[in-house]
Amino acid sequence: MATALVSETLEGDKLYQQRARMALPLLIRQAHAGEPITYENLAAELGMPNPRNLNYVLGCIGQSMIAVEKSWGTEVPPIQCLVVNKNTGLPGEGISEFLGNLSSYSKLSKRQRRQIVDTELAKIYSFPSWHKILTLFDLSPAASDFTKLIHKAQKFRGGGESKAHKALKEYVASNPINIGLKGDAIGHQEYRLPSGDSIDVLFEFRSECVAIEVKSASSNDADLTRGIYQCVKYQAVLEAMQRATDSKRNVRTILIIAGELSSPLIALKNMLGIEVIENVTC
């Protein structure tokens, strides 16, 4: 029997139920932000070493939403649809158990799955009663106010490029395979955008361009916050460039850091949908 059908609802002391009660506020945070989250990133926020163990957690949340739907007599979208594979951008096959009678989800093409998931995501983002569901299960909202971090980032003043930053930037530009990129392209350093900004490293492949923002081990939370928001800007400008030049390439933006993100920054990058690669050294 599918895991989704075996999982019980949120009330209970089993480990997956405890994790589901931790996960639901995070998913509601993502719903309010209008941003999916990968299995890996959700597992990391929950302190789970293996994302595969989310199957019971997400099944538990799905069963709980069905129970609420029956109790309220109104549709509650399957919020676990927000959790997606980092490569496909789609939820796993287990989501089919929560998509009505769509038992053939696994047999559909990627395009057909995308259409179905996009419909569900629209319902999730527009659902007005997520806060009531938190109250129903006696759960507190996940932190989503990053005002202090933003203020620190606004006040932060860098002192010019350090040797460590330059070395890490050069390493990344010359070693795409070591940061998970396929292909042997050499990255363009200090790539100039029409907005006047310069990207630390830009890789251009046939089907996609990948912008890299680099932060050395000396970067504090304020500087790392700036890096996250730089990625937001690069993504928007590069997508605008693709439209203006009638290019069909996919745009991807990554923040590469020599250290690790603090818990608040992990939450921020997940809420904004920023890809981060930690512990990269040259």
Image (spheres, grey):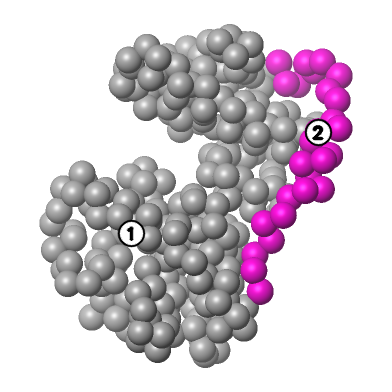
**Towards the viewer: 24 or 214:** 24
Give the number of marks.
2
Residue located at (26% from left, 62% from top): 93
Which residue is nearer to you in this view: 157 or 131?
A: 131
Is 243 located above or below residue 102 in the figure? above
> Mark on residue 120?
1
Q: Quadrant of the N terminus?
A: bottom left
From the viewer's side, name the closer residue of 20 and 259: 20
Q: Is residue 26 above or below residue 218?
A: below
| Residue 275 image position (x, y, % from top left) | 53, 39
Point out residue 214 in the picture as x, y percentages from the top left corner: 65, 26
User: Is residue 143 part of the magenta span, yes or no?
Assistant: yes
Q: Is residue 166 left or right of residue 255?
A: right
Can the viewer see residue 173 in this picture? Answer: no
Classed neighbour count for the residue bearing mark 1: other residues with Cα under 10 Å, few (<14), some (14–19), many (≥20): some
Q: Is residue 190 left or right of residue 80?
A: right
Q: Residue at x 18, y 59 (%)?
A: 106
Tell me residue 249's x, y (percent).
34, 22
Q: Secondary structure at mark 2?
A: helix
Amino acid type, callout 1 = Glu
Quadrant of residue 194 within the rendered picture: top right
Local packing at callout 2 (Cα closer than 10 Å; few below 14, some 14-19, many 20+) is few
Name the disc covering residue 155, or none. none
Image disc number at residue 154: 2
Image quadrant of residue 223?
Answer: top right
Q: Position of residue 39 (x, y in %)?
A: 45, 56
Q: Quadrant of residue 159?
A: top right
Identify the magenta region: 140-166
